[in-house]
Image: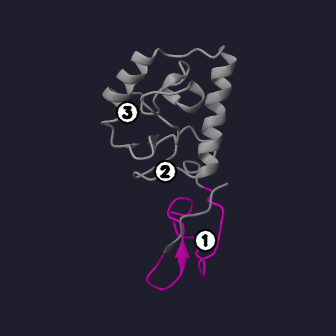
Amino acid sequence: MIDCPLEQLADTRWWCPRCDPDRKRLLSQKARRNCRSVEYAVGSTQYADSGGRVPPTAYRLLSYAQALARWIAAGRPVRTDWEVMTIHSQHCYPCDDYDSQREICTVCGCKAKRQGMAVRNKIKMATESCPKRKW
């Protein structure tokens, strides 16, 4: 599970806006707590409300493992280098959810590069697609 992104209220109590929107589980001090939100939990189809941030490591590892398992089960099909460069330049690079410094999609957490081996590049794996259905 993922730690709650706790926020402080005016009366110095803490709450999680994701798993406790009704503010029923207020804390007297900031502490670590597992987030119960379905959208934010590891195993959901995409990381909710990334806001340009990179998803948590646990989520990224699970997303990568699932993509790798699908790719291997399908017989390791790959896209051509031309297809990869076209997808990257037309869809990934101009997208608001793409971190060009890290070459990572901030929605799913996967690496999305212009080139490289399929094991290290989601675009190269022919079994994978954009979580926002752009490609």
Residue 9 or residue 88, whichever sits in front: 88
Labelled pair 2, 3 in contact (Cβ < 8 Å): no
- Residue topped by disc 1: 25
Residue at position x 53%, y 38% from top?
A: 110
Residue at position x 51%, y 37% from top?
A: 111
Of circles 1 and 2, the one toward us is 2
Q: Rounded to the nearest whole Å, what is the CA distance between mark 1 and mark 2? A: 27 Å
Q: Position of residue 43 (x, y in %)?
A: 64, 42
- Magenta segment main secondary structure: loop
Residue 48 or residue 25, whichever sits in front: 48
Return the mark for residue 68.
none
Labelled pair 1, 2 in contact (Cβ < 8 Å): no
Q: In which quarter of the image is the C terminus?
A: top left
Q: Tag 2 or tag 1, which sits nearer the N-term?
A: 1
Q: Where is residue 116 in the image (x, y as percent from the top left)?
A: 51, 27
Return the mark for residue 54.
2
